[in-house]
Amino acid sequence: MYENEKVLVVPTEDVERLCNKRHGLIFVNEYDIISLIENKGFFVDRNSAETDETIRQVIPYIVLREENKFLLFKRTSKQGEKRLHNQITIGVGGHINTDDSLEPLEAFKNGLIREINEEVDVDIKSLNYVGVINVVDTPVSRVHVGICYVADVKYKGLKEKDKFIELFTENPREYFEEMEGWSKTVVQSLELMQK
């Protein structure tokens, strides 16, 4: 299904320990999550990772903001993951694999930038770590962990125009009901941070 793609994973028990068994967008010291990737990250076949709840696939998840507006994306039916068609995301990101590097931490750093550049054309002004997305309410979320950042950018456009429709808003909450799970989690947390 994933053509022998090898993806970066970390042990679930370590994610839960760092998050103190809390779920949602959790503040974890950036040093601690980076250390986990560096010291316990490894690569496995994506096919097996998709169903193995003892490990979490590491996903950089980057929220893009231009001045006071957030950039959201509505997925079209031409986007690969059928489970997410027509849903809105506030983050760009995806799997880290061995094409990014054979060293877990270097792969994460390279993959984070690659994921942004694959989906959008932006100049990144700043990239700020927010926390760890630790959501366990679905079989899909139980095998992934998000590392969330907010990037202040100069937005130039979508790269995959057939896969996404772009939406700019100062209030992401207005699209809440159409959002996928992680986006809902992030929007709720961003609202709390801004209060």
Image (cartoon, rainbow, N blue to C red):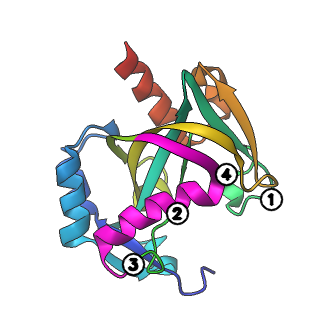
Could you say which disc has been placed on residue 116 in the image?
none
Q: Position of residue 15 (x, y in %)?
A: 25, 55
Residue 64 in view (yes/no): yes
Which residue is nearer to you in this view: 140 or 85? 85
Quadrant (top left/top right/bottom left/bottom right) for the N terminus: bottom right
Q: Is residue 65 left or right of residue 13?
A: right
- Residue 58, above or below 21: below
Residue neighbourhood size for the residue with mark 2, other residues' Cα within 10 Å, grouped as few (<14), some (14–19), many (≥20): some
- How far apart, in angstroms, are the residues tagged by discs 1 and 3? 28 Å
Which comes sooner in the sequence, label 2 or label 3? 3
Residue neighbourhood size for the residue with mark 4, other residues' Cα within 10 Å, grouped as few (<14), some (14–19), many (≥20): some
- How far apart, in angstroms, are the residues tagged by discs 4 and 2? 21 Å
Which comes sooner in the sequence, label 4 or label 1? 1
Q: Secondary structure at mark 3?
A: loop
Q: Which residue is mark 1?
A: 78
Q: Amino acid at mark 3?
A: Ser
Residue 119 lies in the magenta stretch: yes
Q: Amino acid at mark 4?
A: Leu
Q: Nearer the viewer, mark 1 or mark 3?
A: 3
Q: Which residues are magenta?
A: 102-126
Q: Main secondary structure of the magenta part?
A: helix
Q: Which residue is mark 2?
A: 114
Q: Nearer the viewer, mark 4 or mark 3?
A: 3
- How far apart, in angstroms, are the residues tagged by discs 2 and 1? 21 Å
